[in-house]
Image (tube, rainbow, N blue to C red):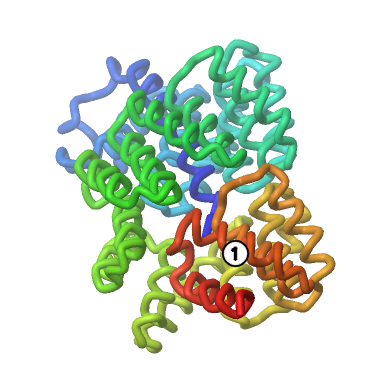
Amino acid sequence: MKDMRFKLLIIIGIVLGGLVIVGIRAVSHHAPRPEAVSRNSFVSDARAKPLDRQFQVIQNAIERAPADPKGYNLLCAAYMKKARETGDFGFNTRAETALDRSFELDSSANNYDAIRLKAMLLLVYHRFGEALEVARRAREIQPRDPQNYGAMTDALIELCEYNEAFKSAQTMMDMRPGTSSYTRVSYLRELQGDTKGAIEAMRAAAEAAPDPETLAWCRVHLGDLLINAGNIAAADHEFDIALYHFPDYYLALAGKARARVASGDFDAAIEFYKKAQERVPLPETAIALGDLYTKTGRADEAQKQYDLLEFIERAGAAGGTYSRQLALFYADHDVKLDEALSIARRERATRSDIYTCDALAWCLYKKGDFAEAKKAIDEAMRLGTRDAQINYHAGMIERALGNRRDAAKYLRLALEINPSFDILQADAVRQILLAIAA
């Protein structure tokens, strides 16, 4: 089950890492030694993580020049990167506060970094149309900055303007090949069903990664691509590399769990998911862990995870980032179907990417509106994406419409792409295929 909110956060964060580091270098020669930092600093422990130590330098720069927007731009970028590293979306609220202060000090084109950061922050908040408009404004100011094309690519993908997204990503790659451009190329190739090309681009992204956490994310996503290519052992190795470079990384721990599920080792998968959840509770982790508990007969523990999922999603809704995960969860588990459809329709009103279309199709199917579900799933499949979940949904919709041949084709493809694509649904697909063949 895909939630592009976190993928988008990570891709944006790759850009932010460079902005923070460059900005820190610009102010660090004026900064006091670590032992001279006041007790009000973000982190005063000399053993703090590198990003936390950078907060110290940024705070001191703001204290020295409170009327200079540059310090607030650095603070915004650092908070957004912190949100990426920790999975705590609340840091983006702090980033927004810092950026508002920067614009209060200078709202002109001279405050270019603030404009570029605004596009990235709007993407995080799923305000894709506004993000595209701001990114284009930034491009007018600095037409040779490749990151503007990256922000435009992200917004165009979510707005279903795929041809323009491909052009924008290619321009970014032509200007500056690197992790930021390679990750976008990988994702676009993945959307087009080119798994081999997506793997190649993600390997290049990992090799160019500027810091351990970014490298770890690239390795995790590479592992997921390898799982979809049927190479579980290679995927598991990539997750191990990620954990070596960035120990206890929550995304890598969840990746290890997915590899264990694919291998049929549910007990080990549960332990890895639990470790990931202890570090950063995410909706997809709660769903996967809950479903594993359900599959292994631990209903009470499963319900705790499902309750956690709803808590996380509703907290996100308060921040304006209600994801489609909750709608898919309700539909998969045949609960609160009216609410699921309402969530999916609301999401579809603001974005028309293939995964949102897929979520809407599944919710419509569960409500018995098979004709509308067919229209939505056709939209989800228009790029030829090799996604097991989308093909599963397509198969079930075709089955409901009486199209047994197409139903069998899509259901078989779902299992071919990833036999363990869903802890509970994959077994149901096998039973349905047997029934169709009978």
For the residue pair 64 and 108, the one nearer the viewer reads as: 108
Category of crowding for the residue at label 1, using alpha-carbon neighbours closer than 10 angstroms: few (below 14), some (14–19), many (at least 20): many
The answer to whether 368 is drawn above or below residue 87 in the figure is below
**At 28% across and 35% down in the image, what residue appears?**
212
Q: Quadrant of residue 339?
A: bottom right
Question: 9 above or below 112?
Answer: below
Q: Is residue 39 visible?
A: no
Q: Identify the residue at image location x=41%, y=36%.
A: 78
Residue 202: image x %, image y %? 42, 33
Residue 149 at x, y percent in the picture: 62, 23
Residues 395 and 409: in front is 409
As displayed, is residue 336 above or below residue 180?
A: below
Q: Quadrant of the C terminus?
A: bottom right
Q: Is residue 313 visible?
A: yes
Residue to which mark 1 is pinned: 411
Three-letter code for the amino acid on which mark 1 is drawn: Leu
Residue furthest out toward the front: 438
Image x and y of residue 402, in percent: 78, 73
Using residue 296 as the reference point, say whether residue 168 is left or right of it: right
Secondary structure of the residue carrying numbered label 1: helix
Residue 313: x %, y % from top left: 54, 66
